[in-house]
Image (cartoon, grey):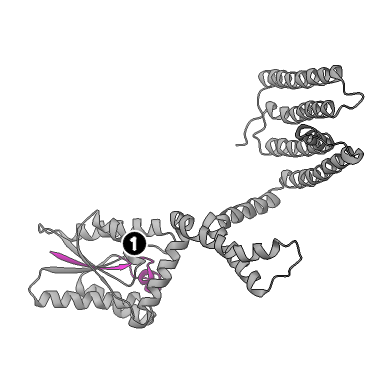
């Protein structure tokens, strides 16, 4: 038996007419097509139903044992739609109740509906696929679907869009390379924007940006302290970076050339107090959120003490390399010991507190 399957992947038939699917049998499919045409005569899925009826009639005239059915998926997710098509096909096959070998001829309205072919092939042998598209729109639809697949496929994005984006960025980068000595024109600006867009699509940055925005919004509505503390920590980090650079300029003011270790030490010595403040601020915000959400554990309080210990050690090492008067070997040994003891003391203290007082329970 040959089964003519009319595919409607996004369930336009069910959504626009209220007809329950799958629809099996010529008369039922014809009734569904007429009702669908009345509801939306411009929908391309309507052509699929009438083409299926046309194929059914031709095959019957040729003496072929044939049946027709219309099956639908779901609007939105392609995975859920394919799964729904598979379930409806199982129902159709169960209704046929024939001992003959069933083969399928698929009728679709474009390349997107044909993505369900593997699902159908896993249940029944496919003799062919008939695509029914309005003639004026066939090439346009194929081009649209191809572009959509390119933009959504991670492998294709990485191999095509990223190099293309880099090529488009060459000109604006060449303009900016003159350090404002040459002003770019509109072509450079346009190509730069297109290049940035293609790079963002190729790297999937839009999903990450959307996820970050969703987390920020959910944090605002949930009253998360980390939104404020992370912002403050970021400002402190920027101030620390600027302070480190100023310290380096101060050390170089006497004209004495510095080696790479002394340059790093100068930057660290000026920036580390601000970096430590940023670390303590962000860690305290995280601890507060963990406590409010019921996931608090005593060992989380180690974070600010570890930050202070590491900051003290780095500052002592940096000023020792710079040769400050107070930063002799004894001072370095003292700060290394103090940082180690601070880390050990906090670890032991909070471990004992957790063993005796227990963890804060999660909310019911």
Q: Residue at x 65, y 70 (%)?
A: 189
Looking at the rendered structure, the secondary structure element under dot 1 is helix
Q: Position of residue 35 (x, y in %)?
A: 33, 79
Please identify the quadrant where the C terminus is shown: top right
Classify residue 138 by image quadrant. Answer: bottom left
Q: Position of residue 265 (x, y in %)?
A: 80, 33
Residue 82, above or below 13 = above
Classify residue 84 by image quadrant. Answer: bottom left
Pointer 1 residue: 115
Of 312 and 130, which appears nearest the observer?
312
Residue span colored magenta: 1-21
Q: Is residue 13 magenta?
A: yes
Q: Position of residue 54 (x, y in %)?
A: 20, 78
- In the picture provided, is 209 more to the left or to the right than 145? right
Of 260 and 197, which appears nearest the observer?
260
- In the picture provided, is 360 more to the left or to the right than 237? left
Circle 1 packing at 10 Å, graded few (<14), some (14-19), many (20+), is few
Q: Residue at x 64, y 55 (%)?
A: 213
- In the picture provided, is 87 more to the left or to the right than 334? left
- In the picture provided, is 317 more to the left or to the right than 290? right
């Amino acid at each position: 038996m040959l089964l003519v399957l009319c595919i409607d992947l996004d369930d336009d038939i069910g959504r626009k007419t209220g007809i329950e699917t799958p629809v099996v049998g010529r008369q039922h499919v014809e009734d569904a097509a007429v009702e669908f045409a009345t509801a939306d005569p411009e929908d391309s899925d309507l052509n699929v139903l009438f083409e299926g009826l046309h194929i059914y009639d031709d095959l019957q005239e040729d003496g072929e044992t044939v049946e027709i059915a219309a099956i639908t998926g779901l609007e939105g997710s392609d995975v859920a739609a394919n799964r729904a098509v598979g379930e409806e096909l199982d129902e159709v096959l169960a209704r046929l109740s024939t001992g003959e070998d069933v083969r399928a001829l698929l009728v679709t309205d474009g390349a997107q509906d044909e993505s369900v072919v593997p699902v159908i092939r896993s249940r029944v042998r496919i003799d062919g696929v008939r695509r029914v598209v309005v003639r004026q729109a066939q090439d346009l639809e194929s081009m649209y679907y191809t572009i959509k697949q390119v933009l959504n496929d991670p492998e294709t994005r990485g191999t095509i869009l990223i190099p293309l984006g880099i090529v488009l960025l060459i000109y604006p980068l060449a303009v900016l390379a003159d350090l404002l000595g040459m002003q770019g024109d509109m072509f450079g600006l346009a190509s730069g924007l297109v290049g940035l867009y293609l790079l963002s699509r190729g790297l999937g940055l839009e999903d990450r940006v959307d996820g970050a925005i969703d987390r920020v919004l959910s944090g605002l509505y949930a009253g998360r302290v980390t939104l404020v503390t992370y912002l403050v920590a970021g400002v402190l980090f920027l101030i620390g970076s600027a302070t480190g650079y100023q310290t380096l300029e101060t050390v170089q003011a006497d004209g004495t050339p510095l080696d790479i270790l002394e340059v790093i030490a100068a930057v660290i010595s000026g920036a580390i107090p601000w970096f430590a403040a940023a670390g303590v601020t962000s860690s305290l915000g995280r601890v507060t959120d963990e406590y409010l959400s019921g996931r608090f554990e005593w060992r989380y309080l180690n974070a600010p003490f570890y930050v202070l210990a590491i900051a003290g050690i780095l500052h002592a090492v940096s000023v020792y390399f710079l040769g400050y008067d107070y930063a002799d070997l004894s001072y370095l040994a003292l700060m290394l010991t103090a940082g180690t003891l601070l880390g050990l003391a906090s670890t032991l203290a909070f471990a004992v507190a957790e063993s005796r007082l227990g963890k804060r329970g999660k909310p019911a």
